[in-house]
Amino acid sequence: MTDLVLALTSGAVVGLALGGLGGGGSVLAVPALIYLLGFTPADATTAALVIVALTSVTSLAGHAREGNVAWRTGLLFAAAGIVPAALAGAAAGHLPQRALTAAFAAVAVLAALRMLRPAPPARPGAVNPARAGAAGAGLGAVTGFLGVGGGFLAVPVLVGVLKVPMRRAVGTSLLVITVNSVAALAARSGSGSSLDWAAVAPFTAAAVLGAWDGKRLARKATGSTLQRLFAWALLAVAALMLVDAVR
């Protein structure tokens, strides 16, 4: 019963972040699976991909209905990350657990710092295809390697590099996250990871419901307030994981 409550609570928090911010929640999913539900780092990153993919596609549907998804831009951006996501996903299972934990902690710190900074303004001008492709490939690699959606990286890139308005960038980032997560999951399908569906299923269900609440919450609270709350939570989680990796 305790594990069920923890899975439901953790899933709701992850969903709130994904629905409200277009990213950030998946960075909380992995440590929640490790420290609250007893997953190994390798199994946690695989389970997080399942949770993030299903939650993102559900939240994406809501943004799409409101016209807040730049489909062509999002698909092109995601396409650059498919191969890196698959390669990184296949390689992740061969890393030592401590190295995976330390790498994840570093990404959590990056995510928190990114969320504490204001989003870059969308400036008119030509899009640089090389920069966009490099950003998409890097995001795909992070998703495949660590099981995070990477929305905290996708949103500022979509706004600052690809000139997508902020509101559409949040919805478009969910499209990118979905594509990259599915590619990484496909690469991990033969890795031999066995998931505890008794924990993953309620976690995912709560995340899906939380994503809808997050979308509504985003209309009432300022984006900067939500980002600061999640950023400080991420910094605390990163500190815990770094201590665990080095001791």
Image (cartoon, rainbow, N blue to C red):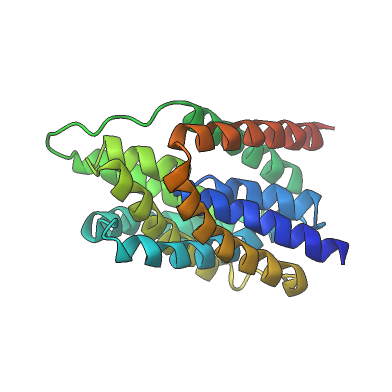
Task: Using residue 18 as the reference point, say whether residue 28 is left or right of it.
Answer: right
Task: Using residue 101 as the reference point, say whether residue 216 is left or right of it.
Answer: left
Q: Nearer the viewer, residue 55 or 30?
A: 55
Q: Relative to residue 145, is residue 157 depicted above or below?
A: above
Q: Relative to residue 114, is residue 59 depicted above or below?
A: below
Task: Using residue 91 as the reference point, say whether residue 222 is left or right of it.
Answer: left
Q: Quadrant of the N terminus?
A: bottom right
Q: Is residue 115 visible?
A: yes
State the count of labels: 0
Q: Relative to residue 131, is residue 34 depicted above or below?
A: below
Q: Position of residue 152 (x, y in %)?
A: 46, 41
Q: Position of residue 166 (x, y in %)?
A: 31, 41
Which residue is painted at 32% across and 46% down in the image? 167
Which residue is painted at 33% across and 54% down in the image? 172
Name, please, the residue furthest toward the front.
Answer: 220
Q: Position of residue 104 (x, y in %)?
A: 63, 42
Task: Tell me the quarter of the picture where residue 65 sits.
Answer: bottom left
Which residue is painted at 74% across and 61% down in the image? 7
Q: Quadrant of the C terminus?
A: top right
Name, please, the residue furthest toward the left.
Answer: 125
Task: Tell me the quarter of the picture where residue 222 sits.
Answer: top left
Q: Position of residue 96 (x, y in %)?
A: 73, 48
Q: Nearer the viewer, residue 148 or 206?
A: 206
Q: Is residue 93 visible?
A: no
